[in-house]
Amino acid sequence: MFRGRIGRLFLLGIVLVAMQSAGCDSDVTGPSIPIEQLLAAPEVVEIDGHSYTLECFLWRDFMPVSPPDGKPLAVHVIVSDVDSLDIPETISLILLWVINGDEVWETSFSNESLSSTPPHQLPRIARNGPKWGPNIYVDVVVQIMNAGRQTFLLKAADQFIIMTE
């Protein structure tokens, strides 16, 4: 079926496109919200009478069992009520953006169960990001939804990506 040089090149192209599509867990092209809007997000947001802040822990794993160039970026976020009031169960985290210069990784959160946290904190984790860093600073933005299905952006600026080894 794929005889000759042109046929083999065509087949190789199809295989490369399929491999690239299958292996691409991180989207660093065109976020669903303009980058300017993400960068303008507040670092404290008020939702239904509660004020929230965002804490982040970003890392790339370079442990001996990791690939030589390390594992992709992982991000652990915690949204906290400023007054340590319980976060209503109707508040949820929808999306995460990590901004590195003019590149943006947009993703949803994993369904992993995280260790117990105080009721005034809402933790989430995202994995399989780009292989940015480590030892660089990025901005992190989350999208929060309330019971009325309104969405809000919350930012943590200048977050450091560490390397675990």
Image: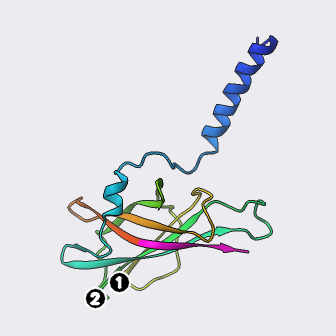
Q: Which mark is residue 97?
A: none
Please state if 6 lies on the left or on the right of 123 as rendered: right
**Residue occupying image coordinates x 26% and y 65%:** 146
Q: Classify mark 1: residues with Cα within 10 Å, few (<14), some (14-19) or many (20+).
A: some
**Mark 2 residue element:** loop
Please state if 127 lies on the left or on the right of 152 as rendered: right
Q: Nearer the viewer, mark 2 or mark 1?
A: 2
Q: Which mark is residue 120?
A: 1
Q: Report which residue position mark 2 lands on.
A: 83
Q: Quadrant of residue 41?
A: bottom left
- Which range of residues does the magenta coloring cover? 157-165
Q: Nearer the viewer, residue 56 or 135?
A: 135
**Residue occupying image coordinates x 80% and y 11%:** 3
CB contact under 8 Å: marks 2 and 1: yes
**Mark 1 residue element:** loop
Q: Classify mark 2: residues with Cα within 10 Å, few (<14), some (14-19) or many (20+).
A: few
Is 163 in the magenta?
yes
Q: Amino acid at mark 2?
A: Asp
The image quadrant where one finds the C terminus is bottom right
Is 2 in the magenta?
no
